[in-house]
Amino acid sequence: MRRAVVTRLAWMIVVLFVLSFVVFSIQRTLPSDPVRIFFGRNASKELIAQKQHELGYDRSFFSQYGLFVNRLFHGDLGTSLRTRRPVVSDLMDFLPGTLELAGSAAFVGLLLALVIALTGALRRKGGAIVRVIAIVFSSAPTFLLGLGAVLLFYRHFHWLPAGGRTKSATEGNGWVLLRSIAKGSPSKTWEAIRHLAMPAVALALAPGVAIGRILRGSLLDVLEQEHIRTMRAGGLTERSIVLRHALRNALLPAISMGGLQLGLLLSGVVVVEVVFAWPGLGLYLNQAIRLADFPAVIGVVLVLGVVFVISSAVVDLLQTVADPRLRGRA
Amino acid sequence: MAEATVVGVTRHRRPSAPIVVGATVGALALVVALAPAWLPYGSRKVVGKPFEHPLSGHLLGTDSQGRDVLVRSVLGLRTSLGSAFIVIAIGLVVGTIIGLAAGFAGGIVDTVLMRITDVALALPGPVVALAIAAALGPGLGHTLIAVAAFWWPWYARIVRGQVQSIRKLPYVEAASLGGLGSLRVATAHVLPGTVGPVVIAASLDIGAVVLVLAGLSFLGLGSPAPAAELGAMTSQGLQFLFNAPWISLCPAVGLFLLAASGNILGDLLRDRLAKAGSR
């Protein structure tokens, strides 16, 4: 077990370095010179040359990469051209919102997957329905689900707010949900959940259904096996067979599918934030793209990339927890 | 077929579901591809007042600039479909070359190429594509390159697996012994056998590629403004969502239909292959 964990973590670090290198190469091949953009058109040549020297832009490619990594470790991602603040402070403001949204979506998605798998497995029917639902939700663009939800639950029924994280526009940053839970304020918590509901569900539907479909199939396979027949013969209730014995064995393919869905979740969160005006990395990124604010774009991509790499390592480790056979293999 | 001819009776076989669906989708794709020939206007033509409601002269209404939403959506579909094909084609070519080289050369070349493939799979493709597209600047071509840059690793793995099993077959050995150069053996004798599985895998991906490209276009990483692109049309319509929802909804629904056709076809094909495999 320990060997599997160490190997996986080592691989994760390798991938993180590759990620930083890819992002650095993208940044270096930008057609535009960030220094020139930062100082504007009327800057003197000396000023630009001095700043370029300061930032190390006159050095060789690999020595610049060294500088880049060094700055990364010191939390320096440059200055946003739009907000004129350090990109890192911007990211710190917006990351919690994205994590709360993506985390809630992952939670809702897993719940949905369990519901699909368990109702299917206990009744043994509904394969066709699950199949149709799976195709529908894997084909719907995330923004279509978001728009449909806004038109239905905000515009038509007036049940849920159309966007944002709180009623007031000013307290949109930080850990809104976690803070209100920690403070023990039911009204603020409810407020945060109401704002989370639509974006989280819109984001969770596609991955949840995809995982649910896989889990259902693998659960049905496990329930055909002989040790399950023995349990039935031994008089265990169907419920305890499914929940206590079959589910664990059926989890493996579902966990792999979950890993595959992570990338979709992290790119989906960007789109969902734009639809619901959710003050997170996605909205920040969208504004940055439209104004060609590259330091900000690069910063968001790095953060999302790191979140992705770390969470796929976690998913892989979950797999070794679920299946002892994977532990010996490195 | 075989069992029907043995007894000498010609039975009418119902065409299988993938064929029916495939033919329908193919016909629709052709209709969309030829859209400029049969549509009454181009994508930029102002045909009426802004915000005309659907069914009021124009089937799906007009947008904020008085352009026909249906016409623009159909042209957007055409762009989406064409883009998805291009991305998959690039992915196939790159993936096949890398998979073929890795599987055929073996040894250190194989290890290095497959490690690169592993790393590419471990990075968050859509997110990195976003950075590449943003760095290259607005333009559909740039977005296609950015997505294609992350769409080959699966294909490389499939091709490599195929190559490894094929290159041990007697006819390949015979070709090598016959004095053909390894490049010739690889391309003329091994490559054809790898094509089937990887093309099927690629055809299952059309829906997913369509959605990834639409997401990037929605974020402003597609063709610049007047072009009819479904993701961009949806995001431009957002500001009018409550007064003129059709401007955003029509292109988004169009995307859904396109991705759904691809996914239904893929689902049926996969089903069919699973059955064929278990037999």
Image (spheres, helix red, strand yellow):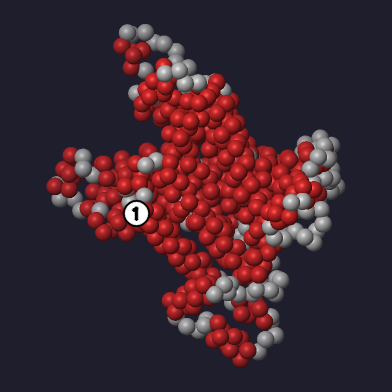
Determine the residue located farthest toward the bottom in the rendered image: A46
Q: Is residue B35 above or below residue A296?
A: above
Query: Which element carries disc 1, helix, strand or loop?
Result: helix
Question: At x 53% / y 45%, what residue is drawn?
Answer: A261
Instruction: Say whether residue B179 is left or right of residue A119.
Output: left
Q: Amino acid at mark 1?
A: Arg
Q: Position of residue B228 (x, y in %)?
A: 68, 50
Residue B69, position as x, y percentages in the image: 75, 44
Circle 1 residues within 10 Å: few <14, some 14–19, many ≥20: few
Position of A93 relative to A32 (above/below): above
> Residue under mark 1: which chain is it in?
A
User: Residue B162 in the image: x percent, y percent?
Assistant: 31, 42
Query: A165 or B241: which is nearer to us?
Result: A165
Closer-to-camera residue (B146/A23): A23
In depth, the one of B250 and B279 nearer the eye is: B279
Which residue matches tag 1?
A3
Image point 47% across, 83% down: which residue? Answer: A59
Q: Residue at x 55, y 28 (%)?
A: A118
Q: Can residue B85 be seen by looking at this rendering?
A: yes
Q: Is residue B23 visible?
A: no
Front residue of B160 and A218: A218
Q: Residue at position x 70%, y 85% from top?
A: A42
